[in-house]
Amino acid sequence: DVKVTQSSRYLVKRTGEKVFLECVQDMDHENMFWYRQDPGLGLRLIYFSYDVKMKEKGDIPEGYSVSREKKERFSLILESASTNQTSMYLCASLPGQGGEGWNTEAFFGQGTRLTVV
Amino acid sequence: TQLLEQSPQFLSIQEGENLTVYCNSSSVFSSLQWYRQEPGEGPVLLVTVVTGGEVKKLKRLTFQFGDARKDSSLHITAAQTGDTGLYLCAGGNQFYFGTGTSLTVIP
């Protein structure tokens, strides 16, 4: 059974803190994504990675960075958390090489609900 | 600006009724995916449509991809309480997700 695991279901952090959200997949997928989900806006792509140590910006990368040191792990970092980063964060992994061949299923973690106070 | 707009945003219907959810864009996509998300869980894939004009059926769910590959619809026949959830369309190799339709089916 395929699995994408996010390290925390709920997090509460203070403004200005550095926050790490961890995601691990056990499917040997090349591609991993980080989204944030807000009511009425759907999912918005923050960053994605198509290989170890590779990263690409999505639609809303400002205030975030990522790290992919190992194939199975993709970390999202909030350098200095702000209240407008309060959201649900979803990690996903996707098989296959990059480009047009990604018409396959994305497997999602259960999400991390982050509250910044 | 959202690349993929879904309508309606909220839908509350009685069990047994039919419904249609729409996903529209001004951009052409090589494929579109439909996902369902239940509270506290990540989205789960329902279907991928690839060919313009394609119709796919999954039990009581019918998915259609527009001829111009800019829009898609999801039709549910005889809705059940288990259909309750957030329905999301996605395109562009899942770089872009729709705004979502929250469906509640009342017993």
Image (cartoon, coloured by chain):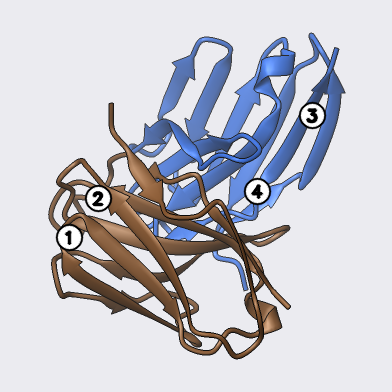
Chain colours: A brown, B blue
Front-most of A74 and B17? A74
Kind of residue indicated by mark 3: Thr
Q: Give the Cα separation between the discs numbered 1 and 3.
A: 36 Å
Q: Which image quarter: residue B40?
A: top right
Chain label for disc 3 = B
Q: Are marks 1 and 2 on the same chain?
A: yes
How many residues crowd around disc 2 within 10 Å: few (fewer than 14), some, or many (20 or more)?
A: some
Q: Identity of the amino acid at label 4?
A: Gly
What amino acid does circle 1 point to?
Answer: Gly
The relative height of residue B92 versus residue A85 in the rendered view (above or below) is: above
| Residue A93 placement (x, y as % from top left) | 30, 50
Does B52 appear above or below A17?
Answer: above
Nearest the eye: B69 or B9: B9
Q: Residue at x 44, y 48 (%)?
A: B68
Which residue position holds label 4?
B100
Q: Which residue is mark 3?
A: B104
Element marked by disc 2: loop
Residue A98: mark in rendering: 1
